[in-house]
Amino acid sequence: MSKMVFFKKPEMKTVSRFIENQRDAFLSYTEINKTRQNLPVKNFNNDFQKVAVGKGKTDFELAKSALKNWAHFPNHWAEIKPEQASTVPGTNLCLCIRLFGMWWLNACRIVYQTDEVQKFGFAYGTLPAHIESGEELFQVEIDDNDVVWYEIRAFSKPRHWLVRFAKPVARLLQEKFRRDSADAVRRFIADKGQNISKKTWRPDTWLLALAATILLSLLVFPATIFHHDYGKPVLIFATLLSTPLALHLLAFHNFLSPKAEKLLPLLFPAGFTAALSQCIDFQIIAALLTVPWLILSSAFLIAQKIRAGNAVQFAISASCIFWWIAAAWVFAYPAGIRPFGFSDEITRLTAIHFHFAGLALPILAGLAQHFSPSTFGKYTIWMAAAGVPITALGISYTQLGKGIEVEIFAGIFMALAGIFTAIRLLQIAAKHSSLWLLFSGVVLTFTMLLAAFYALRFIFPVEFLSINWMRAVHGSLNAFIAIPCGLIGFAIWKHKK
């Protein structure tokens, strides 16, 4: 069998030789042309996805062009060689996948093509030099209501021993491919036939970020859930997963400027060093490790530029500003900087506050307004954006010994902003049957009610509502459930749109 795995990108002559070696090979499965039928194939993993990507004949022609030019492949991690490969049955080609620092070559053959007035598509089958065995159909069609649909239909099973060994990961990557493929077709249509590469993370980067989050969080334990060190895993999660997810979601919805989008690949190395700083006790080294996160947030703010032409732009601009402030507080903690005489605990909590309430909450409110505009949605955005600095001001006012009145007002204001955002998420969840947004809205409502009661603790004392209890319950539920579920909900709902 031809060599399939390379540790650097193979030259085109190597790929051409790889394809040539499979010229006379038979397909590696016997269920040929079964993707023509919308029926499961026994003894294979069966996958199906059909999503709307446009409307009208112009979009349909662009969608056809996307398939003919292989623009439906997410070219930041999956490419077809040769680049202008024919979709005529009998054509051999190579699927090149870049994952985990390696290039994986996979030989395929076009098995059939459909070219009708309202439908165009083709399917390829796997040859022996492929990590999987099976067949995959890519098809676009326009219905009687002028809606353009993109469909992927496939059946497959692992062939390479590594894929068998890591089958759950392989299945996740197949799901990721289908989502990225739909995004690529939408983008091709939106850009009027320009196959522009998105500077987003590859699937393996997300897996590495998840693994790093788990590993580094374990390193900062043991610690009780109410111990002050508990904030360290939250910051690790913020820098490695939550913040990148929020910013990538903006990129997927085309809210980022081209310059800001180019910075997205830097999120993992900068976030990793910032997360690693939470595991280092040596002050100077820990502070230096947070500098890339601060520099990246500053560069991102400059690249994105501050715009407030409408409520959604205002929400995104506010999030970028708050990310920069959050990064400054992440640097302040190990550097020994304590503004306003804040304690170590409050310094870390401020960094957490600006990462989640500051960066992520306005993005959720902004996306809700983008997909379901309303006057109430505009007010929600203003309150979410204003509540973050007002809360910081209230805490600072108390720290300076000026009284508790401002902190009470700030706490109630921020709680209302969060509850209003939760209501917006629940409205969209009900309209679009999104369990992710429903769960996010319910949890956010609960945590913000807790915040309101905590703000009123000086007037109506509740014994168990201590700062430790609020941090462990309110903070953790927001950081690990409400915010991520909301972001994931919008990502998934977008694909159903």
Image (cartoon, rainbow, N blue to C red):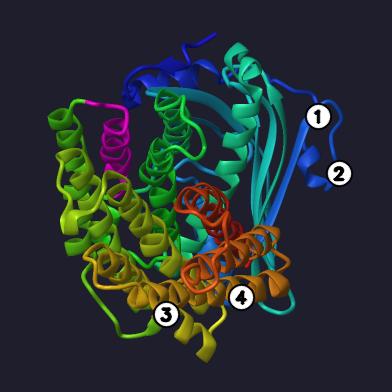
Task: Magenta stretch: give its range.
Answer: 264-281
Q: CA distance from mark 3 to mark 2?
A: 50 Å
In the image, what residue type sits under mark 2? Leu
Instruction: Label 3, secondary structure: give it.
Output: helix
Residue placed most toward the observer, 94 or 344: 344
- Dot placed on the residue nearer the N-terminal end, 3 or 2: 2
Instruction: Label 2, secondary structure: give it.
Output: loop
Residue at the (73%, 66%) spot, across then down:
433
Quarter the C terminus occupies:
bottom right
Look at the numbered discs 3 and 4 and tell me whether their residues touch, using CB distance below 8 Å: no
- How dense is the environment of label 2, judged by Cα within 10 Å: few (below 14), some, or many (20 and up)? few
- Dot placed on the residue nearer the N-terminal end, 3 or 1: 1
Q: CA distance from mark 3 to mark 1?
A: 58 Å
- How dense is the environment of label 3, judged by Cα within 10 Å: few (below 14), some, or many (20 and up)? many
Instruction: Label 1, secondary structure: give it.
Output: loop
- Dot placed on the residue nearer the N-terminal end, 3 or 4: 3
Please give the residue where the numbered disc 2 appears in the rendered image: 39
Q: CA distance from mark 4 to mark 2?
A: 40 Å
Please give the residue where the numbered disc 4 appears in the rendered image: 423
